[in-house]
Image (cartoon, rainbow, N blue to C red):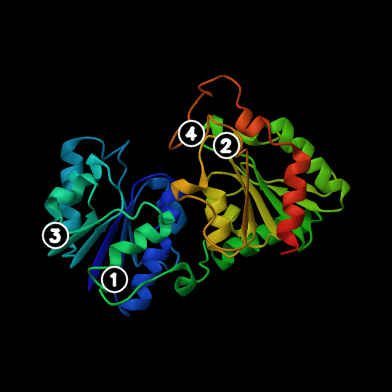
Amino acid sequence: MTVLVVQTAFLGDVLLSLPLLSALGHAFPGVRRVLVTTPQAAAVVDGLPHAEDVVVFDKRGRHRGAAARRALSAELRDMKPDWVLVPHKSFRTAMLVKPVGAPRLVTFDDASARRYATDRIVYPWPLHDADRQLALLRPMLPDDVWTKERVGSLDICTEEDRQFVRSVLDAEGIGQDYVVVAPGTVWPTKQWPLEHVRMFVGDLRRSGRQVVIVGDASLAGSIGTGDGVVDLCGRTTLRQAAAAIRGARAVVANDSAPIHIASLQGVPVLALFGPTVPEFGFAPYGKRAQVVQRADLACRPCSPHGSRQCPIGTHECLAGIRPDTVGRALDELLTK
């Protein structure tokens, strides 16, 4: 049996498709799982045990035009899939899957692809997004329910990635007991101010904790280094960053992909929420997690994804979260 899972949203959304892919493997031994996703996510998932094949849908690049999209649809049709599961709701994704012609196409009742679907799942808004995506299994497994507890922890790195990171950390004098801080995010309003991050990292060092900073090259040098602090920003692939996260005592991050990388791998995570709220379904997925947020602000949430600028010009939702507050929350998380 061949099952396509079509998820071409942000990296964090794709990571939250991994429990769905894992559940397929457990429920149907020998299934061929094909993940259709973005170039960025493909670089993370390809080579991991959660999908037998990864197909790149470069919707903003080489597949941007209708002709290129139709050619990719034909490639997917040639795979003769038995099922197509579509957690992504966009019109572009609907146009991609329409010509595939699988016997069964499952999506949500509010997705653009619903008009081409054989099975429409009522969108389970109250659930975590990973559990929402697992709900797409209902037509395949009508008498079964898959949850985080059944799926378990999932590796988002290889042994080679882990060895590379350990060699770098060994060279920098970082032992096994370190905290990862991931200060980046696609949306500026979802970023804890970097001056707060610097103060927080300084507090961690004064308390005796070693710190590893992960992120893209644009953040390199933004937090600073020193004894017991290593800046890996721009020095690793996403999977190598995931390996650094996997080996951490805990992870501190904004509402962004690193909180999902951590929680899916079973690593304790402290998530800072500003313009968004956990009720949207994108909190850390698991019990070893804690959220820090300004629940007293009437302006939250102001956006489903975050935005480029604070609508009222204060950014108080994150600027108002003090480093010592995050430090106390981290101590509580680590003593759970």
Front of the two marks 2 and 3: 2
Could one spot residue 223 in this view of the protein? no
- Describe the element under mark 3 as helix, strand or loop: loop
Q: Amino acid at mark 4?
A: Gly
Q: Nearer the viewer, residue 32 or 234?
A: 32
- Residue located beneath label 4 in the image: 306
- Residue located beneath label 3 in the image: 118
Mark carried by residue 179: none
Q: Please count the marks in the image.
A: 4
Report the Cα–Cα distance between label 4 and label 2.
8 Å
Residue at left offset 36%, top offset 47%: 38
- Disc 1 residue crowd, few under 14, some 14–19, many 20+, Cα 10 Å: some
Marks 1 and 3 in Cβ contact (< 8 Å) = no
- Residue located beneath label 2 in the image: 274
Q: Earlier in the sequence, mark 2 or mark 3?
A: 3
Front of the two marks 4 and 2: 2
Q: Earlier in the sequence, mark 3 or mark 4?
A: 3
Q: Amino acid at mark 1?
A: Arg
Front of the two marks 1 and 2: 2
The residue most toward the bottom is: 29
Give residue 310's position: percent from left, percent from top. 54, 24
Residue at left offset 75%, top offset 43%: 325
- Residue located beneath label 1 in the image: 32
Residue at left offset 54%, top offset 65%: 158
Could one spot residue 283 in this view of the protein? yes
The quarter holding residue 263 reads bottom right
Q: Is residue 29 left or right of residue 152?
A: left
